[in-house]
Image (cartoon, rainbow, N blue to C red):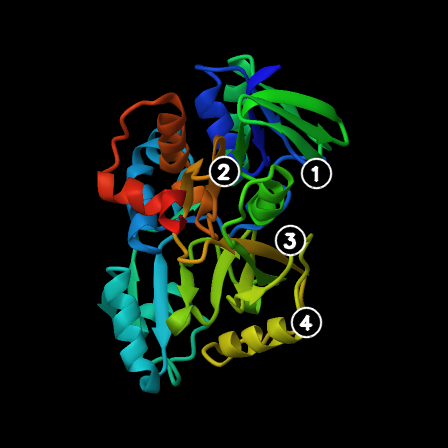
Amino acid sequence: MTDIIVIGGGIAGTSIAARLAPHASVTLLEAEGALAYHASGRSAALYESNYGLDTTVALSKASAGYFRDGGYLSPRGLMIAARAEERAQFEADTAKLLLELISPDEALAKVPVLDVAQVAHASFHPDAWDIDTDKMVQDFARELRAHGGTLHTKARVTAITGGAGAWAVHTEAGTFEAALIVNAAGAWVDEIAKLAGVAPLGFTPLRRSMARIPAPGGLDVSTWPMFFGVGESWYAKPDAGSLIVSPAEEDPQPPMDAWADDMVLAEGLARYEALVTEPVARLEANWAGLRTFSPDRHLTIGHASDNAGFFWHAGQGGYGFQTAPAASLLAADLILGRASELDAGTVAALSPERFA
């Protein structure tokens, strides 16, 4: 018997398990053979604190100290490039992300393959950072273990019996008992709720495809910023000497081990190619991940309205890493009965009570 079972070993589950471990006995269950296998392992891994809805921004900004003090960030920068006819959307995106206008020539200096005959508008700021996601996950896992918590991989949940105060979670690795379940199962959160007899909230997993291409023109891309098309219609980001390009699609999928859609990937690559001088000759790899959103697209953090022994930590929607430090602290505060440093309006906007 343990105090708390956390279901899901992505960044959401690993971080909340670590936050709780100094105060309670915690068991973390992950269905796959390794942590961060699904969405967390396929993230673009950028910390940009102005990116997302207001509650996401609040969590991201509240996470800044953790990232800085832990040494998880390295400089990247963020840039938007747009054609002349895309000016209205460009201006809206630039204002939302608090970017500074730069000239097409300045944009070309940052990304030398941009086609200045096509790029009429550009904006940039340096305050976007790569996240060392593996270090972050492993540090949270070490913290969990250091405080006596246990971690089980290959522990896919098959059934949940009992109820608040006396749950039995049946998995492929055995049965685990606890007083409280924390549901951090990513794309599977509604499925876990159904197994526990808790009303699902209507989370939707959305596929996002990625392609890794060779460095354009054989250039050194290491200092290039992450760069977007308007309306987040595509983005590109340096990665280990290559370039990741995504069509940034949001196509509904059932919970699954997702894979890239070839046609969607080709369309996204074409949008990228329209603004650069180097065509994509080949792919080094491609993959996809599921970004899971609640019906209103805000994260959901709090006790289930129909079962106080079941806690939602769900709907990260692609913002999991950049919000994890503050989101996991909020979850721990709510479970342990502590006051949160976040403002009451943000806490209420994240609560599952909003769906009751």
Front residue of 328/100: it is 328
Q: Earlier in the sequence, mark 1 or mark 2?
A: 2
- At label 2, which amino acid type do we have? Ala
Residue 255 disc label: 3
Q: Is residue 346 left or right of residue 321?
A: left
Front residue of 343/211: it is 343
- The residue labelled by disc 1 is 32
| Label 3 – label 1 distance at C-alpha | 14 Å
Residue drawn at the location 50% of the way across and 38% of the way down: 12
Asked if residue 344 can be seen in this view, the reply is yes
Q: Earlier in the sequence, mark 3 or mark 1?
A: 1
Disc number lying in front (4 or 3): 3
Residue drawn at the location 71% of the way across and 29% of the way down: 170
- The residue labelled by disc 2 is 12
Asked if residue 61 can be seen in this view, the reply is no
Q: Vertical placement of 298 versus 160: above or below?
A: below
- At label 3, which amino acid type do we have? Pro
Residue drawn at the location 70% of the way across and 35% of the way down: 159
Q: Earlier in the sequence, mark 3 or mark 2?
A: 2
Q: Earlier in the sequence, mark 4 or mark 3?
A: 3
